[in-house]
Amino acid sequence: MTEQVPPNLRAIRILEVLSESPAPPTPTELNGRLGWPKQTVHRLCQTLIEAGILEKHDRRLYPGRRANLLATGLADRAAGRIGCHQLLRQVARESGETVNFARPEPRGMGYVDRVETNWAFRVALPIGTHVPFHCTASGKLYMASLPAARRRSFLGSLALTPLTPNTFTDVGKLEAELAEIRRRGFSLDREEFHEAMVAIAVPVTDEMGRFYAALAIHGPMQRFSLDDAIAKFDLLKDHAARIGDLLFAPGG
């Protein structure tokens, strides 16, 4: 039976079949599994061999050096993400509030991981949610990390839509806020995204010291004031450094 696979995904499908095979297949055996034209399978295999992704020994196909490096790297990153989630759980336990791990994406800051508080009253923003740059602690933290020229261009591209009376809608005032974030090393959301909710965020940086993600705590003001948020700075800073080590330190 012929598998219908888009041309740009056929190389990936070959690697999948290789990983599923009980023994290294020959190109002919691979073709029997896929049902594609023989010349297509042989051409793709040859391309992968030349790229170092596959190796051929005694007519049989094996993962090449680049495929093995990719598999190892992905496994290491998976282990890093698991460790990262455990650190988020620690922050949630010690702070008593919801903890977010957010990355900059085209639609806004994307929540890639999250640990909810046990409180019944909380703001529900599940993993996969995107929040604005200009009115969230994580978004402002990211913008503050940008080089000056890029930051000005980025700010000029944003619609500073007011979501609460405290949302920054003036570029000059937002620029001043970003300068203050750079000075103190953390970012605050003072009811700018949701009324009666505050947040604090610190950066997680890569091995070059570049912004990678924001580690943030947020909660309702009836139990989590701005002073409470600022008091969590050292907790967040310590765990952000540990997350950075997990994700980026050599041998980490």
Image: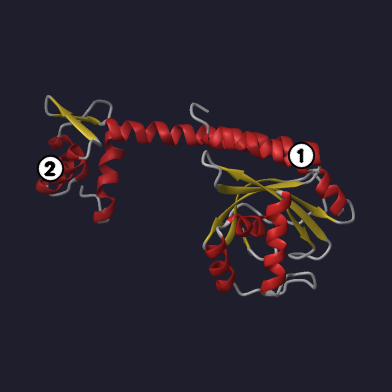
Q: Which residue is mark 2?
A: 42
Dot 2 falls on a residue whose secondary structure is helix
User: Residue type at mark 1?
Assistant: Asp
Task: Decide if residue 117 is on the left or right side of residue 221.
Answer: left
Q: Nearer the viewer, residue 249 or 8?
A: 249
Q: Is residue 199 above or below residue 250?
A: below
Residue 133's image quarter?
bottom right
User: Residue type at mark 2?
Assistant: His
Q: Residue at x 58, y 33 (%)?
A: 245
* Picture coordinates of residue 231, whole percent (x, y): 83, 44
Distance of mark 2 from mark 1, alpha carbons?
Answer: 57 Å
Q: Which mark is residue 234?
A: 1
Q: Residue at x 84, y 62 (%)?
A: 196
Dot 1 falls on a residue whose secondary structure is helix
Q: Residue at x 65, y 40 (%)?
A: 240
* Picture coordinates of residue 112, whole percent (x, y): 58, 49
Q: Which mark is residue 217?
A: none
Residue 242's image quarter?
top right
Task: Decide if residue 235 is on the left or right side of residue 129.
Answer: right
